Image: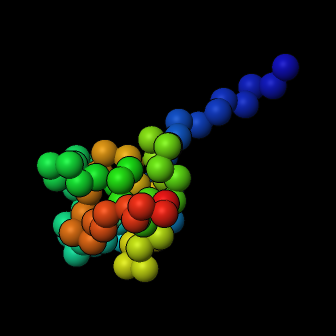
Amino acid sequence: MTDYVIPDPEPKEIDEKLSLELRYLAQNAVLKGKPSGAEKCENCVYYLENTADLSYCWHPKLRILVGAQWWCQWWEELGEAQ
Ligand code: SF4
């Protein structure tokens, strides 16, 4: 048996960088963690997997993981074909 103690998890420099980028994206995109009326990521054309609670947003200005109940200014209605 070893005396090694697993250290408490701590964010690394890359996490802080990504967090800052997400904050900028959120500010620029008016990205909100809640729907705007009936508009939300899960019924947006850019939400990759419409049955998932979390999915990838492929909008060219975002390209990040978002929640089904989130919303941003670039919301676009899903077409009938999708
Ligand atoms: S464009 Fe906006 S509303 Fe549409 S999936 Fe991406 S973050 Fe959500």
The foreground one among 14 and 5 is: 14
- What residue sits 28% from the left and 52% below the top? 40
Residue 71, image x, y percentages: 26, 57
Determine which quarter of the picture holds residue 61.
bottom left
**As displayed, is residue 55 above or below residue 7?**
below
Residue 48, image x, y percentages: 51, 59
**As displayed, is residue 5 above or below residue 58?**
above
In this picture the colour scheme is rainbow
The foreground one among 1 and 21 is: 21
Please indicate, yes or no, whether residue 48 appears anywhere in the rendered image: yes
**As displayed, is residue 1 above or below residue 49?**
above
**As displayed, is residue 14 above or below residue 4?**
below
Seen as rendered, the residue at the extreme top is 1
Ligand 1: which quarter? bottom left
Q: In the picture, which quadrant includes the N terminus? A: top right
Q: Say whether residue 59 is left or right of residue 56.
A: left
Seen as rendered, the residue at the extreme right is 1
- What residue sits 74% from the left and 25% below the top? 3
Q: Say whether residue 76 is left or right of residue 1.
A: left
- What residue sits 49% from the left and 43% below the top? 51
Seen as rendered, the residue at the extreme left is 37
The foreground one among 32 and 78 is: 78
Residue 16, image x, y percentages: 41, 62
Q: Say whether residue 45 is left or right of residue 74.
A: right
Seen as rendered, the residue at the extreme front is 80
